[in-house]
Image (spheres, grey):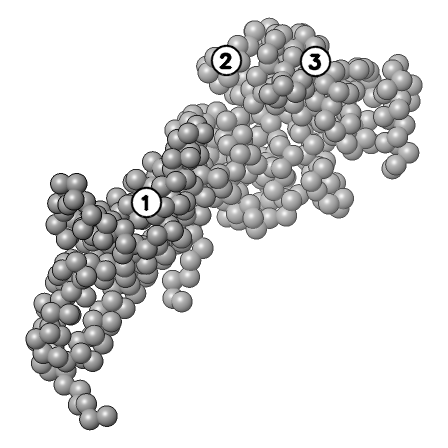
Amino acid sequence: MPQIEIKSANAFYDKLHVLKNIELSVDRGEIVSLIGPSGSGKSSLLKMLVGLLIPKSGDVYLNKTLVNFNNQSDLRVIREQIAIVFQQYNLFQNMNVLKNVSIAPTKIQKRNPKEVNDQALFLLEKVGLKDKLESYPDELSGGQQQRVAIARALCLNPEILLLDEITSALDPELVKEVLDSIRLLAAEGMTMLIVSHEMSFVREVSSRVVFMDDGSIIEVNNPKNIFESPKEKRTLDFVGKILKDK
Amino acid sequence: MGYTLVYTQVLEFLPYLIKGAWISLQIAILAFSGGMFFGLILATIRTFGNNISNKIVICYVTFFTNTPQLVQIYFLFFALPEFGILLSPYIAVLLGMTLNAAAYLCEIQRAGFLSIRQNELDAAKTLNFSLMQQVKYVILPHIMKVLFPPLSNHYIIMTLGTSMAAIFGVEELTGRAFNINSETFRSVEIFSITALIYIVITFIATFLLAVIGRYFFKAKIRIIQ
């Protein structure tokens, strides 16, 4: 049963048509990776799913329920179930690590602070930041900040996790520690949509890979086929170029 | 130089001077608060307003930051009566300083608006913060941290600027010092003590503002310079 279903969605930034007739469904527990050149609409697709970009036409279903993006209570519902980790981490600079992770569960979801605190500590330990609880974001490296952002997203107990190029702002040696955190989640069966340029990682963790170009989905295929024998010429060009550069 | 310093005569006037200092402080606090409020309105218009309202605010700010404050107060005190508006010296000074402060504080507060980080607001939205929660947890703490040091500076400048009120006959600290001087002619003693009182006032204010800024708003201010 599809957990997310997107039907002929179109979205714009002012006059720029960034998502064109997007059709995609994602099943529970699936890990779907979005690849494609810069500006192809991968990030916009994730932004649309959390209501930061409102589609102009088309339908999005979450657990078989149609989402009305202009309705605040619908937005609350999708944001309770879908968490996003941004490329630039987007941590709150005026809060320490523990507060960044625990503020939304305590102040917004109104959960028991003690229980949230325990969960935050558990998650921060899992991403290897147990000794940085009192640090502020500007005292951390990019890789550490990104792992705080992952812990912040997970502390919401989301059903679906969106990862928007979470390693592209990091130094190569920091990429591994972040990807290791994601591998752990993948093993636990969380539904994920991943935008990434780390092709070997994409190939390793994905159930399916979506290739996007110029706002459209060009091809959806399993990871082996998309890298070895893609159906579309544009996919072949992109994959060939990326793999040659590596 | 055959001048002998005699402080005893002047020290008798100390309570009189300190009461004057209190009036200086009142003018500074009132003008600063009024300027903050009016400046916030101007900064809001300048940030979110349309083209015409923007231009009006720009004209206002340009005028008040490019003419001497003394001329602005002279205008209020001497020119407005020609139009039938008669202001007392105290009100003219207070109003002039408030209007002037509004222009500067508008620009400072506008810089605060512009420094809000869109990506933190995106994160707050996806974490289901309401608009009020975004203001409370993300926008205000950030703005206060950025704005506290320049606002404190401007407050200190305004405190010293209140001495201009003496020209219009307001009996604040400088005005009272001037009065004692014409009675006793002990200029060196009187104006050195007056300067000392100003230093004490600004030091106390600087210290209190630094403590508030550091511990309430996490602004990067050193408490002991």
- Please tell me whether mark 3 sits on a helix, a strand or a loop: strand
Which class describes the residues within 10 Å of circle 3: few (<14), some (14-19), or many (20+)?
some
Mark yes or no: residue A137 visible.
yes
Q: Is residue A63 above or below residue B197?
A: above
The residue where tag 1 is placed is B102
In three-dimensional space, the C-alpha distance between marks 3 and 1, rounded to whole angstroms, equals 49 Å
Which class describes the residues within 10 Å of circle 1: few (<14), some (14-19), or many (20+)?
many
Mark yes or no: residue A201 visible.
no
Q: Nearer the viewer, residue A176 or B16?
A: B16
Tally of numbered tags: 3
Q: Which residue lies at the image location 34% right of the left edge and 47% below the top edge?
A: B64
Instruction: Tell me the kind of residue under disc 3.
Output: Lys
Horizontally, is B221 left or right of A11 in the view? left
The x, y position of residue B62, in whole percent, is 40, 45
In three-dimensional space, the C-alpha distance between marks 2 and 3, rounded to whole angstroms, equals 20 Å
- Please tell me whether mark 2 sits on a helix, a strand or a loop: loop
- Please tell me whether mark 1 sits on a helix, a strand or a loop: helix
Q: Which residue lies at the image location 65% right of the left edge and 12% below the top edge?
A: A10
What chain does badge 1 belong to?
B
Dot 2 and dot 1 within a common chain = no
Q: Quadrant of residue B5?
A: bottom left
Dot 3 and dot 1 within a common chain = no
Q: Which residue lies at the image location 47% right of the left edge and 12% below the top edge?
A: A71
Locate the N terminus of chain A and report the quarter of the image it occupies: top right
Q: Which mark is residue A70?
A: 2
Q: In this view, does B36 lie above or below A182?
A: below
Q: In which quarter of the image is residue A37?
A: top right
The residue where tag 3 is placed is A20
Q: Is residue A94 above or below residue A26?
A: below
